[in-house]
Amino acid sequence: MCLAVPAKIVDKQDMLATIELSGVTRQVSLMLLPEAEPGEWVLVHAGFAIQVIDEDEAQKTLDLFRELEQYEELDR
Amino acid sequence: MMSETIQLAHGSGGKLSHDLVQQIMLPAFSNPALNLLHDGAQLPVSGGRIAFSTDSFVVKPRFFPGGDIGKLAVCGTVNDVAMNGAIPLYLSAGFILEEGFPVDELRQIVASMGQAAIEAGVTIVTGDTKVVEKGAVDGIYINTSGLGFIPEGVTISPCRIKPGQDIFINGYIGDHSIAVMGERHGLTLPATVLSDCAPLAGLVKELLTAVPDIALLRDPTRGGVATTLNEIAGQAKVGIRMDETAIPIRPEVQAVCDILGFDPLYLANEGKVIVIAEPCHREKILETMRSHQYGVHARLIGTVVAQPAGQVGLQTAIGGMRLLDMLAGDQLPRIC
Amino acid sequence: MKNLTVEEVRQSARSLTNEISRLANRPIRIMEVCGTHTVAIFKAGIRQLLPEQVELVSGPGCPVCVTPNDYLDTAIAYSRKQDVIITTFGDMLKVPGSTSTLLLEKAQGADIRIVYSPLESLAVATNNPDKKVVFLAVGFETTAPTAAATVLAAEQAGLENFFVLTSHKLVPPALKALLDDRTTKVDGFLLPGHVSAVIGEQPYQFLIDEYHTPAVIGGFEALDILQAVYRLVKQLDEGKPQLENHYRRVVRAAGNSTARAVLEKVYCPADSNWRGIGVIPYSGLAVNTDYRHFDALVNLPVEVERLQEHKGCRCGEVLRGMIKPGECALFSKLCTPEHPVGACMVSVEGTCAAWFKYGAGRWQL
């Protein structure tokens, strides 16, 4: 129940942001995430930005998955 | 089990369209050529074989990025004829016009048809026009039927499909659907999203010249690649295994699909051909396609397997296996 | 996982599934409670990669599936009124009510418009001042704030012809109801990543404190899901149930407080009827008194046909993870995606539809 995609904010006018994903753009409402700023990646659901994607955590996840490749046994 | 009234899904190319043909049309018309249910009929006449096909066009909007209903009307039938391995030669064009339809628009549409015909190397040799009262049709409906000549040595048929054969596609999928859908639901699409509507007769001719032995050609129109592969698997009584990572999709098209919840494997294409042939021809087929303007992004996307017959499996990016069923109706944007 | 190569993804998946196989030395039942997880799991072919003893079961996580017949009947009744325009997410269109669906009504001429965002309803309302626009407000905690925000926007715009017909559901009360039902057998929960983006981690703590059931908040990429399953299996192996968040790039511990504030302004918790489960206390949302003028049921009288439930439909047991779709006598015979009897078959993410479409469990090569 929650089809949502990460997209980048490329413009912001008050409570409306323009998000962009692979060249496709749409206006989304920032009523649920007023602090989001252009340049940030946000999670978009039903025409609203609902959370800012944490770039550090995203990188950590990527690194983890890359690491997994090399390990026979996991130990965390 | 047929419903009592026609629903939109009966025209969407998926399971219900199939049921309609199987349960209503076939019983009334049944004959060997028709029963094969390939893209057109292959008919013996003295001196050789001809391919004969028909299609009707009702697309809205009538003008979309990359084409219009006229271009579609010519390319659609040209392609259906070409899918029989035939060289398309002659088209007919029937028009049903709504009273009040703007003549200027009609001019644009037929100009488009003329241009497409030239590119496809066909002539529109006969036609008909009817006008009905306002409201009886939605603007303009076009029917085109096409005839082509099948060269010696070419036999395109689901019967020729065998396990072990390669499955190719000539380029990006989903472009047409997304271009036509255009800017619904507030999406703005980049200029790179254009309908892939194109006459494939030239590409088919080059392919058959290079590899006359090709087993099957089919264009994945309504219902998309997944539906077409299901049809093929069912008709040929084989299984099909696809590689998800090999299927070419434009990132922009994937983005729209991700946002609205569509699966690109079920989106209509108007300039794509699925090619099935023995693996010994692989390099030749890829080389021939990639040196043609309509095959630049050609890929090997799957293989024919013996079992499970009639089913299409997709090996996923993660290495899992997913069953690709036929579409039950039109895809709708979703949030869930 | 777009930044990883195909080989990296496949190899990481192998590492995770190897570990899962190594640790899972008894039958384990993991329930995912998010329709989007159900589909992601099928689309990625994940069941194929898991060992036999790890079973992934779909819970009541598809808001469409748990929407009861009478809600659909009401929506259909509204759609039959000449002065009403229905706006709805595409998901609702084929859900069967007692005798009809919105799609069938549309075919008969009802003005029903599919929207991607509830905000699109406001333009419809503005452009059709003589009509009443009723938005079908369904969805869990991810979607409910968007509907609430739309109500606030309607208020700001001074719209008087916009209404919501609500059937929002909440996840934590449903989890509690599932665990209180002794027939439910679940060893761990894969928690919905996007609902969690709104509600945060705290609402799930009771799963550990009161029920000692491992729970992991997971994302929706294939590797996210495998990671979450691995963590659950590891917790079970170590015998230490915990609440873990493995979708930190989206889920903050505190969730999204603005979204919750918007939600609470317009809605309040209320008892709610879940198809196949029954009424769960405070598991749904009702419109607050301050916003009653946007509530369709309060402002637009409508006559709804008598409720009929279909005999033989076992959606409830499917939703509670008690039976697999194949065990329902109607599955793929009387109940198919073209002719769905119950909501599990209708939604793209309904368990039965997913099983039908993607192949029950493992597809044999």
Image (cartoon, rainbow, N blue to C red):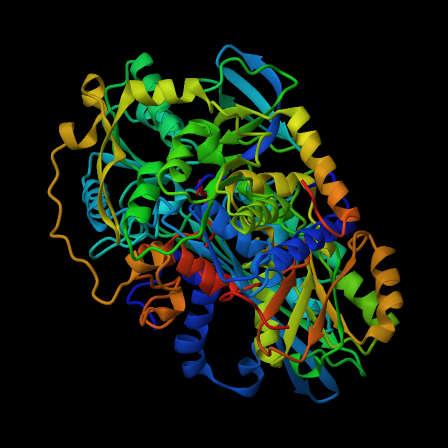
Q: Give whichever of C272, C175 is nearer the camera.
A: C175
Report x, y in % for residue C170.
33, 36
Query: Where's the C terminus of chain C, which quadrant?
Result: bottom right
Horizontal side, residue B32 vs residue C171: left or right: right
Q: Which residue is most to the front?
A: C239
**C8 to C261, vertically: above or below:** below
Q: Position of residue B324 (x, y in %)?
A: 56, 63
Q: Residue at x 38, y 22 (%)?
A: C260
Q: Residue furthest bottom?
A: B46
Determine whether B171 is above or below B230 in the image: above
Instruction: Provide residue C172's location: percent of width, then percent of height.
Output: 35, 37
Front residue of C190 and B242: C190
Q: Residue at x 39, y 36 (%)?
A: C209
C103 versus B53 height, above or below? above
Residue C316 placement: quadrant: bottom left
Choose between B187 and B263: the one closer to the eye. Answer: B263
Q: Residue at x 54, y 80 (%)?
A: B34
Residue C16, image x, y percentages: 66, 51
Res B176 visible: yes
Q: Is residue C98 left or right of residue C360?
A: left
**Which of the 4 quarters of the picture holds residue C25?**
bottom right
Can I make out residue B38 in this image?
no
Q: Nearer the viewer, residue C28 or C267?
A: C28
Please determine whether, in this image, residue C126 is positioned above or below residue C15.
above
Number of marks present in the image shown? 0
Report the side of B8 relative to A49 (left or right).
left
Give the quadrant of the N terminus of chain C: top right
In this picture, residue A55 sits left or right of residue B323: right
Residue at 66% x, 76% y: name it: B51
Find the residue positioned furthest to the top: A14
